[in-house]
Amino acid sequence: MTQKGTAILDMGDGAPIELPVISGTMGPDVIDIRKLHAKSGLFTYDPGFLSTASNSSEITFIDGDKGILLYRGYPIEQLATHCDFMQVCYLLMNGELPDNKQKNEFDITIKSHTMLHEQLVRFFTGFRRDAHPMAVMVGVVGALSAFYHEAMDISDASHREQSALRLIAKLPTIAAMAYKYNIGQPFIYPCNDLSFSENFLHMMFSTPAELYKPNPVIARALDRILILHADHEQNASTSTVRLAGSSGANPFACISAGIACLWGPAHGGANEACLNMLEEIGDVSRIDEYIKRAKNKDDNYRLMGFGHRVYKNFDPRAMLLRETCHEVLNELGLQNDPLFKLALQLEKIALEDEYFISRKLYPNVDFYSGIVQRALGIPTIMFTAIFAMARTVGWVAQWSEMISDPTYKIGRPRQLYTGTTMRDVP
Ligand code: CMC
């Protein structure tokens, strides 16, 4: 961080306030308002954080106008093409890509943490049979807090790393068990002969009677989905994890909070909502009706899988998944799948519509990830759980970055009070 200049805030009272303007390594400069309140008694007002950088970070960079996404400086296109998810996890956590030896050791370490404590496995049966996997994940991930007391000193870097590795390794097991419980099949334990993505597919689709043989096309597509969702700078769930963590809460509780936030349909829940929307539309002939609804100011309806707070030209993750979507559907012989055709038609109509063009609303990552996951045979209720599995590494990397910064403070936003002024009880 370097100070580039000074911004002057002149309230017209003869005492202008000087505020430092700070540059990072890329992206817009920021006005440092940390001393604004002390100097002026004023707060800034920015609901939804439209103009606010909540922290500095070295992990992920986004340029929404140019459609650039970098993890630790590497373009997402290159990572998605040349790396697997484990390499990307290592990169996000450690700042550099692993060499072969580091990669092997990392794979082995993650595999050594894939099982759950058997007492934790019993938590699942406390949920209603039809519980949504995300509801189960919020609960079970939070419950991990009760199992690792010996390694939960957040001021100890080795404890932080241990918790981060446990979370990355156990999330697929928790997600797959949540699914198995939902459909009434026995839990399938992890198999450490398999890669991260293959193992997840095994836990989802094997039964004690029949072993699932991972299809390399499906495993590679899933791995790509995980890479593309691994981190996305200060999005709502990551900010939730940071805010929860800023009080000193343990990492399992913080990630559980992140999962809860991710579940919302405006965030990670959009992939499930998008597929449900496509099923509800049902036929190409009904697309216009839904586009009309999305454009109607008196209707809250939105086209799921369209629009993004930061990407205003294209979402690079969506471009990559669009490519994967075509590859997977061709490979699996599903090009004529009616829902896929409907999705392509909706994409075309929305991209040509003035309403969507003028508001820069493009298909986002969730639009294509739902279609790809459906083609891979993953049930709709698992889409957001897979997003959570992928984003866990981003959450733990961001949480750890915050805790290891000696200057971090508890997050405590202020407000513009608009309620009743002081009055006496009658
Ligand atoms: N369908 C119809 N209109 C939309 C949509 C949409 N999907 N998204 C935004 N708009 C309109 C909105 O009504 C507003 O119009 P106007 O200017 O006339 O009032 C304008 O576009 C700007 O919308 P906004 O709500 O101010 O934009 P935002 O940056 O606050 O919201 C968003 C971004 C992603 C929450 C929103 O586009 C949305 O709700 N999209 C659908 C849900 C979705 O796909 N979410 C996944 C996001 S990507 C993955 C992730 O983050 O997890």
Image (tube, grey):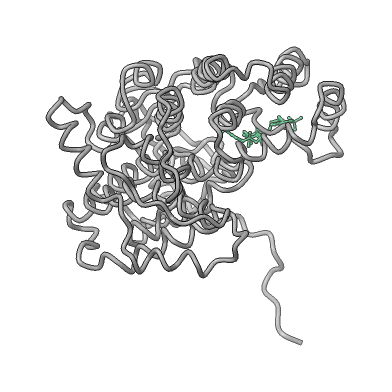
Specify the quadrant that holds the N terminus: top left
Quadrant observed for ligand 1 in the rendered image: top right
Q: 119 above or below 348? A: below
Residue shown at 70% from the left, 38% from the top = 276
Name the spot of residue 233 as percent of width and height, x first. Answer: 42, 35
Name the spot of residue 364 as percent of width and height, x first. Answer: 59, 26
Residue 305 appears left or right of 403: right
Looking at this rendering, what residue extends furthest in the bottom direction? Answer: 426
Residue 24 appears left or right of 179: left
Residue shown at 28% from the left, 47% from the top = 400
Q: In front here: 245 or 97? A: 97
Quarter-of-image position of residue 298:
top right
Specify the quadrant that holds the C terminus: bottom right
Residue 41 appears left or right of 359: left
Name the spot of residue 31 as percent of width and height, x first. Answer: 42, 34
Name the spot of residue 6 as percent of width and height, x first. Answer: 38, 30
Can residue 12 be seen here?
no
Q: In front here: 380 or 153? A: 380
Q: 22 above or below 73? A: below
Q: 141 above or below 359? A: below
Can residue 311 be seen here?
yes
Residue shown at 40% from the left, 65% from the top = 143
Q: In front here: 376 or 99? A: 376
Q: In front here: 46 or 128? A: 128
